Amino acid sequence: MTRVLVDLLFYTGTKGGMESYVREVYSRFRADDPELSFLGLASTELSATGAPWFPGHLIDSGISGDNRVAWARGELGAVRRWARRVRADVVHAPANFGPRSSPVPLVITVHDLLAFRHPEWVPGAYSGAIRWMIRGAARAATRVLTVSEASAQDIVAILGVPRDRVEVIPLAGNPPPRHTSGVRAASPATVPVHPTPARPHLVAVGNRMPHKGFTTLLDALALIDSAERPTLTITGSHGRDPLTPHVRRLGLEKWVSLRGWLSRTDLDDLYTTATALVFPSRFEGFGLPPLEAMARGCPVIVSDLPVLHEVTGDAARYINPLDPANIAAAIREVCASSALRDQMSRAGLVRAATFSWDATATATRAGLLVAASRPA
């Protein structure tokens, strides 16, 4: 039996995509797996709330994932100590960070290299610390898993990890709870702001880091004449929303709703009632929101980035995320044509069906077994 120690020090319940990845993968592993057993080294936040999705025992590390200093020390020292203490056969660090050395084989999942590609978007000294930690863990790893070919190329070129140690395992979108066969729900209560029967409404999903491109999206919305301007909901903020002043400067208070993190049900309702998702990001390791929107039949307008071509293929309308006029033109085009939206919806459903969390979990399990069979 191969014992896997899973590094969950980062998990606080507020980290978005990487937490979704861990939940979806580990909820598909069996507690009675004949080859693998699992121990989770948990943050104090995760230990307090519990993890019914995890297929093994949680160890309370006593380390807060919200305390950057304590968390970093835990990644660098506690994971290694606990691997020895529980006699793990392999360590899985599923969220970019892990120990810079390990007494047993180490598998790390690197989702993106934002701090390397665009350090200006990561706060001050924190950016340098992140780069040092990611580089050290990736070079120490027996196997590096990543979520896209674009990220794999970065890992090889920037971190110097040999390509034969890097494996691409794509993510998947959460399956829609009620939406099937291309029939989209109609729920007027979920239309965001001042809806009228003829007015389109858009949704955008993501945190408020600069690379998400939401200020440019707001600039684009302001370019559209008020008679045809769609309403827009942007979800994913924490506390005071930094986009609020920009909305006011542009006079878009009537058109824009800024929301925090939504429940899965509320987000599903937005996807299934929206005219389109707009995803104007300037950098991604994968891009889950477009995939989840497509799975619900929602047309997607996304940045023209190689990684998003990997995800959305021919189903999306592509935009220049630096050009408000280009974004505005795409919004007008999609909102004006029901035939185009129907075609995009059908193509998106087909594209989304090619991604599966079951496949992600199966490939990850195989990667853990391969790594465990090799020397540290």
Image (cartoon, rainbow, N blue to C red):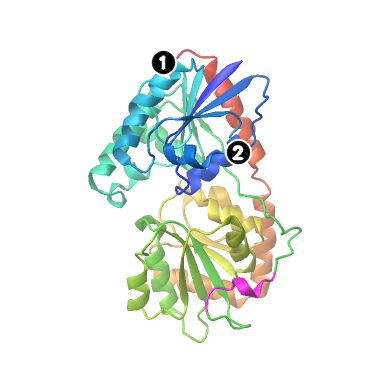
State the count of labels.
Answer: 2
Residue in the foreground of this view, choosing between 246 and 9: 9
Rendered location of residue 375, percent (x, y): 47, 12
Please tell me whether residue 188 belongs to the stretch shown in magenta.
Answer: yes
Residue visible at 38% across and 39% down in the picture: 64
In the rendered image, the vertical position of residue 213 relative to residue 75, given as above or below? below
| Tag shown at residue 168 | none
Which one is nearer the viewer's eye here, 78 or 233? 78
Q: Main secondary structure of the magenta part?
A: loop
- The residue at the point 23 percent across, 43 percent down is 125
Label 1: element kind: loop
Using the image, determine if residue 47 lies above or below residue 33: below
Counting residues from the start of the chain, the first of labels 2 and 1 encountered is: 2
**Residue 103 - label:** 1
Q: Helix or strand or loop: what does disc 2 sit on?
A: loop
Q: Which residue is mark 2?
A: 53
Q: Which residues are magenta?
A: 186-193
Would you say residue 104 is visible in this rendering?
A: no
> How far across and down, in percent of the image, does residue 257 sit?
47, 72
Is residue 259 among what the camera can see? yes
Does the magenta portion include 89?
Answer: no
Q: Which residue does the image show at 60% across and 38% down from the upper left?
A: 53
Question: What is the three-letter code of the residue carrying label 1?
Answer: Pro
From the viewer's side, name the closer residue of 202 and 317: 202
Circle 2: is it few (<14), some (14-19), or many (20+) Cα within 10 Å? some
